[in-house]
Image: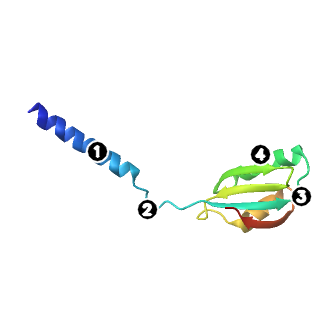
Amino acid sequence: MKKIILMCLVALFSVGIANAQEPKKGDKKSVVVEFVTDIDCAGCAKKVTNTIPYEKGVKDVKVDVATKTVTVTYDPAKTNEQTLTKAFEKIKIKVVETKKAE
């Protein structure tokens, strides 16, 4: 009897692990875009890191002052590049060009 209960628990545990590893159907992939901006100091970088991550759908923001680039990872179901460009305009940072990062 103990063997049967133990085997049932192992089977139940295995099914639970298999279901946890399957990706959810509603999951969307993230999009990574690199914005070339007019930032030129640590203050500008701080302004970006304090504002852009709070835009809807933004998952990650990386600022590189030396190359004047801002890399944004976002959920395409919640936002897009045009909305992010407007967010930069709100904080008075010009976006010169955008390109999809690899």
Q: Secondary structure at mark 3?
A: loop
State which tag comes first along the sequence, 2 or 3: 2
Alpha-carbon neighbours of circle 4 within 10 Å: few (<14), some, or many (≥20)? few
Q: Give left or right: position of 93 versus 53.
A: right
Residue at the spot 74% in from the left edge and 53% down from the top edge: 52
Amino acid type of the residue that numbered disc 1 sits on in the rendered structure: Ser
Q: Which residue is mark 3?
A: 38
In the rendered image, residue 35, in percent from the top left (x then y), is placed at 78, 61
* Residue 25 numbered tag: 2
Q: Secondary structure at mark 2?
A: loop
Q: Quadrant of the C terminus?
A: bottom right
Q: Give left or right: position of 2 versus 101.
A: left
Mark whose residue sits in front, 1 or 4: 1
* Residue 100 numbered tag: none
Between residues 94 and 67, which one lies in front from this camera angle?
67
Amino acid type of the residue that numbered disc 2 sits on in the rendered structure: Lys
Q: Secondary structure at mark 4?
A: helix
How far apart marks 2 and 3 lie (CA) works out to 39 Å
Q: Residue furthest right?
A: 40
How far apart marks 1 and 2 lie (CA) works out to 21 Å
How far apart marks 1 and 4 lie (CA) works out to 43 Å
Q: Which residue is mark 1?
A: 14
Q: Are marks 3 and 1 in contact (CB under 8 Å)?
A: no
Q: Are marks 3 and 4 in contact (CB under 8 Å)?
A: no
How far apart marks 2 and 4 lie (CA) works out to 32 Å
